[in-house]
Amino acid sequence: MTIKTKYIDYEIQDFLKDEFFVKWATNSDPKLSDFWDKWISEHPQKTNTILEAKQLIQSLQYKEEAHLVDDEYIRLYEKILKGHNITGSTKKRYTNFYRVAAAVSLIVVSFFTLNSYYKKLNNYYKKEKEERANYEVKSAANGEKLTFRLSDGTIVKLNAGSQLEFQEVLGDQIREVRLTGEAFFDVVKDVHRSFVVKTDKMKVETLGTSFNVNSYNEEGNHTITLVTGKVGVSTLDKSNYKILVPGQRAHVNKDAEIIISEVDLTEVNHWRYDILSFDENDFDEVIVSLERWYGVKVTIEGTIPTLDRFSGKFKNESLENILDVIAFASGFTYTVNEKNVNIKF
Amino acid sequence: MKSEERIREFSFQASSEASQNIISDNELWTKFLEGDQGAFAQIYKEYVNDLYNFGFQLCRNREVSKDIIHDVFMSLRFSKSKSKIKSIKSYLFRCFYTEWIKRSKKESNLSSLSDCFAITASFEDRLIEKQIGATKIKYLRQALKSLTVKQRKGIMLFFYEKMSYDEVAEAMTLRNAKSARKLIYRALDRLKPTKTFMKILFSFHL
């Protein structure tokens, strides 16, 4: 008896018992549809039986379902990673892991924004801030960096042209801060309060150990790079959620999808060590970086070469030295007048 | 400083997405056994929600469910005896179940079994209901209530959780696929409308 003839005398009950049929009816194996679509077309007298069996299978539901909400999902994972024990009976086996996990507690988050975007957001935050009490805002203007502590002891280093909004006393359920621009966080570990960084595009939540995030914003695309430990990344509307492992970068695209890729970790984090770096950036991006880094205003005359890409690292270089290099590469002349730079092509 | 245009970002995305989608249950488990950190996270990501819902059906208590899931993943992480499994999902379900049994023995106040795995039959649109027939559906709903907890569990693992007989056996700690078959066949026989019963129900409807 071949598989095709086997089913000819089947009734509903027989189909319901058949693994091969159920796999198809529950859509768990798309490869099976070829077989069943063909079989149905060859045995039209069985169509009703098959459809009814399929519908019966799909109709079965639990009376009440339970789902983990975002927060529970993350917290549970965090707890698992930390080996925080409830039962006690298994405690001994996990202490080693717990020690390892607790030893690392460094978190870096950095975000880049284009200047215009940043201004728009600034207004947005100002508006929203008025509605919420006890919020504090720290910002680093272009050309400067700022380091300070939050109420839980977490150290924050803001990059130029960035802003952090946080509660004077961080929440007792969740420590949440809002970031525009780029920043470095050295987060004090707290098993019972996860640390959350929000931008206008996404939310980064620690899952225990440590992580280093570096994000870059172009047309509102935020990118996050994880160096060590684990973080959860989600879109603001919570429609998407991903857990990152070291060496991965996530970015949220226009359709609010989180796309993960692998990156070279040595490239992350230059700014913290006063290294200005470019990696395949176009001319506009380079100018925005220079404006932010040196706190200058750049005006451009002539046509900007749109296809040029710039890569390079500068440690403690003067603005003039960098401009010399770029001017040589792109073929422009420039003048610097106090905080104003004029570029002529 | 000047260099050619390159789309590095793009090539990274392509490769990592492909590897994420194609990876099978088997490969994921092998990676996990080899000590891959990412694989553990992936397992959590993929199965924790199913496990949580399953656990809730079993113990009817959200907090207890989370507690047990915690323990299951903890021992998954640290246990040295990683035996051969039928599938990750059925293995996790099994671990949850055995942990639950352990706890119920210790604490007698944990919920009684009778209201576990409550099932209903819901049809998305009226047309389907009409096609199958109101009487039949009414019978089905009645019959679902008459199943034992074990039968309800088996039915849901097979049809709703999309497990094979092999996997059902693993999840329910049954001896083998044959025992799972037996259990589900019995349940299905109960759900099958008998002719006399249909006649009675039908006359009531008139």
Image: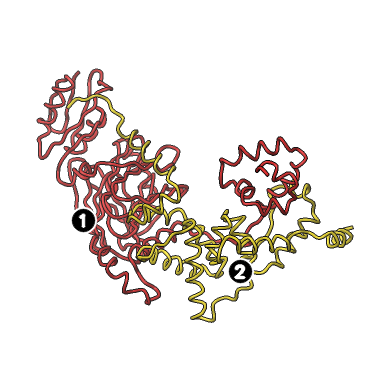
Q: Is residue B191 visible?
A: yes
Residue at 79% across / 59% down in the picture? Answer: B193
Cα distance between the residues tagged 2 and 1 = 53 Å
Query: Mark 1 = which residue?
Result: A148
Which image quadrant is residue A252 in?
top left
Q: Is residue B127 visible?
A: no
Question: From the viewer's perspective, is residue B70 above or below residue A116?
Answer: below
Which image quadrant is residue A168 in?
bottom left
- What is the chain identity of the residue bearing mark 2? B
Q: Looking at the colours in the rendered structure, which chain would you say is drawn in red?
A: A
Q: Looking at the colours in the rendered structure, which chain would you say is drawn in yellow?
A: B
Residue at 21% across / 51% down in the picture? Answer: A157
Query: Mark 2 = which residue?
Result: B116
- What is the chain identity of the residue bearing mark 1? A
Question: Dot 2 surroundings within 10 Å: few (below 14), some, or many (20 or more)?
Answer: many
Q: Where is residue B203 shown, x and y percent of the image?
A: 89, 60
Q: Where is residue B113 shown, x and y percent of the image?
A: 60, 73
